[in-house]
Image (spheres, helix red, strand yellow):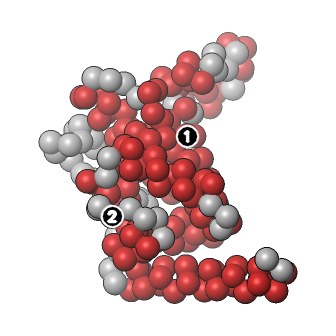
Amino acid sequence: MDRRSFLKTGIGGAFFLGTVSVSAGLSGCATQPAGSLGDSTTRPASSYQFRFLTRDDIALFEALLPAIAGPNLPEDPQTRRAAIAGTIERIDSGIHNFGPANQKELRRLFDLLNFGLTRVTVARVWSSWPNVSTDEAHAFLERWRTSSIGLFNNGYIALTKISNVAFYGYSDNWHLSGYPGPPQYAVDALPQFKNA
């Protein structure tokens, strides 16, 4: 592929993704944050108030986290649900503290993946996220990871980075990555460790 064809393909892809992202937003995919979900059969009781993620975004991460964290999630179903729910709360909290530009980009990505037409055409995921198996979620992530389209690679990086930071950055999961935790002298010297 020569340079001109490459540039046309990149510009065309960016235009397509921008158009479908705007369509997804106008069709109602971009809704208000989920707020408090309370207790349900699929989520443990929590008083957490979602400030960025919508209910659709939560369903997206409930489908993706088993593929991202894999065998490091607990096997017991109740403990597993609690670990996934806690990780999603930490994802929301982290994104809430991002700047507006990063939030805007993530909103576009989430709307793209939550809108049925773009979920099928761009992500090649046929089922809605609550019905996606771990194998299907893993296949989607692998397609975007190995794609020759940079926008898909960036989407993969964004999804996995925020998920991994929220999961492995949680003190109860430090041991899963081999991190022993901060040295005691740092904990004693820095009050933010005591309040974390």
Around disc 2, counting alpha carbons within 10 Å, would you say few (fewer than 14), some (14 to 19), or many (20 or more)?
some
- Name the residue at 48% across, 23% down: 172
Q: Nearer the viewer, residue 84 or 189?
A: 84
Query: Which three-letter amino acid code belongs to the residue tagged 1?
Result: Asn
Image-based side of 100 in relation to 190, left or right: left
Quarter of the figure that contains the N terminus: bottom right
Q: Which residue is mark 1?
A: 164
Which residue shows up at 40% across the image and 39% down it?
66
Quadrant position of residue 31 = bottom left
Residue at the image point whose x is 41% and y is 50% from the top: 137
Which one is in front, 184 or 163? 163
Depth check, mark 1 against mark 2: the one in front is 2
Q: Which residue is farthest left?
A: 41
Observer-nearest of 35 and 117: 117
Q: Is residue 165 above or below residue 32?
A: above
- Separation of residues labelled 1 and 2 (CA atoms): 25 Å
| Labels 1 and 2: the sequence-earlier one | 2
For badge 2, the amino acid type reads Trp
- The percent coordinates of residue 38 (x first, y second) are 21, 47
Q: Is residue 184 above or below residue 156?
A: above
Instruction: Tell me the tag on residue 194.
Output: none
Q: How far across and how far down the image is residue 84, in percent? A: 37, 38
Side of 133 relative to 153 (left or right): left
